[in-house]
Image (tube, grey):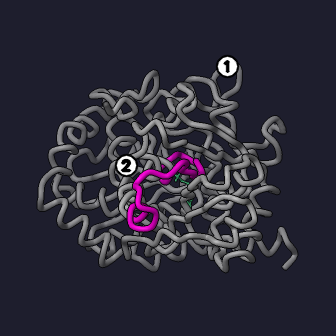
Amino acid sequence: MNSYQADEKGYYGDFGGAYIPEMLYPNVEELRSQYLNIMSEPSFQEEFNQLLKDYVGRPTPLYHAKRLSEKYNTKVYLKREDLCHTGAHKVNNTIGQILMAKRLGKHRIIAETGAGQHGVATATVCALMGIECIVYMGAIDIKRQAPNVARMKMLGAEVRPAMSGSRTLKDATNEAIRDWINNPVDTHYIIGSAIGPHPYPDMVSRFQSVISEEIKTQLLEKEGKALPDYVVACIGGGSNAAGTYYHFLDEPSVGIIAVEAAGKGVHSGESAATSQLGKEGIIHGCKTLLMQTPDGQITEPYSISAGLDYPGVGPLHAHLYRSGRGEFYSVTDDAAMTAGLELSQLEGIIPAIESSHALAVFHEKQFKPDDIVVLNLSGRGDKDLNTYIEYFKL
Ligand SMILES: *Cc1c(COP(=O)(O)O)cnc(C)c1O
């Protein structure tokens, strides 16, 4: 059982582990030795569940999308993570991690952010708990993502620019790691996806697994059975996907579908289709598939969706790809934008462009009329309105 769960050392098949500099070892080891115990404490569970309910607004609905279903001649349910407080699934994880940090006696939080979504989710829960929050962000990204920078500041976080390298996400990550090494005792580092050294991918997957837990209960109510035929999610680092798949990983009757960003085309040189293009390597402390040059330098990814342009993929997903358990698609910017417009006009729901990638699966795969397909709508489109406006000349 649980063959797709991380083993004790954080491996999913060939992928995962903790490849970290020695100076980071005490921090990561402290977390690794305690996270499962802390998460299983009844008082932790109670506080986590209460906040998910009253603060985030869970359970999020499982919505039968009738017009979308009709169009693609199959039965589609949308898991409405777009209705979470802050507009996406990311807050499930940041709430879990802030509670973890408190129990570890940490009173300072650091995070890195690219597009700013994870920074906002982290700043949000730090405000909620009254904890100091420092978000590292590439100087270029600070310019590109001004509204999210303003949100973080309004929430009381300090946004520190990363001035080195390409001044984007990976440089912000380097700065955050440097900070953590220098402040091992009082600081917790909140990673925003199912990536990083063990135990992060497993811990983040468990915090997000509330998504598939709710899907089972809700589907049982609506369909008289807890297992769908397929679950579908988009993959950046892989946290919303991990949460959507979690309780179905070891149910072979449930098909697992992952959608990555092909940008301007998988082989265009401007994409983020990590599983297809990636080679084994180490990024942010774990062994996984990542886009790299022949000499092992990380390739700059591209997607119209800021949340998907990450050069690696979480180790769980690398394993799902390699083992064949997951069915992987990559869709272009154009396909995703079309799917986003389509959902808006068929169902009155404007999705985040990340989620629009998942929706484009219906252009890639023909499902059977009696299939039950549950698609995770990871976030809402408000943050992407300018991109939609420019793309469609609205
Ligand atoms: C950040 C983000 C993603 C991608 O992150 P994962 O960790 O792969 O889930 C997807 N959708 C939305 C709305 C996001 O904000």
Q: Is residue 269 magenta?
A: no
Quickly name the residue at label 1.
295
Quarter of the rendered structure image containing ligand 1: bottom right
Tell me the CA gap for discs 2 and 1: 31 Å
What mark, if any, has residue 77 been given in the picture?
none
Q: Which residues are magenta?
A: 218-240
Q: Residue at x 72, y 60 (%)?
A: 73
Q: Is residue 294 above or below residue 342?
A: above
Quadrant of the rendered structure where residue 360 is? bottom right
Spot occupied by residue 92 in the image (x, y as percentages of width and height): 38, 62
Spot occupied by residue 101 in the image (x, y as percentages of width and height): 24, 56
Q: Residue at x 31, y 28 (%)?
A: 7
Q: Nearer the viewer, residue 343 or 195?
A: 343
Quickly name the residue at label 2.
204
Q: Please, what is the three-letter code of the amino acid marked with disc 1? A: Asp
Placement of the C terminus among the 4 image quadrants: bottom right
Question: In this view of the protein, can residue 175 be seen by the observer?
Answer: yes
Lateral position of residue 312 relative to residue 365, left or right: left
Q: Residue at x 56, y 55 (%)?
A: 372
- Tag 2 near tag 1, CB within 8 Å: no
Q: Nearer the viewer, residue 231 or 372?
A: 372
Q: Please, what is the three-letter code of the amino acid marked with disc 2? A: Val
Quadrant of the rendered structure where residue 292 is? top right
Total residue callouts: 2
Disc 2 beta carbon < 8 A from ligand 1? yes
Lateral position of residue 268 relative to residue 65, left or right: right
Spot occupied by residue 29 in the image (x, y as percentages of width and height): 24, 35
Q: How crowded is the residue under tag 1: few (<14 C-alpha within 10 Å), some, or many (20+)? A: few
Q: Is residue 313 above or below residue 296?
A: below
Q: How crowded is the residue under tag 2: few (<14 C-alpha within 10 Å), some, or many (20+)? A: many
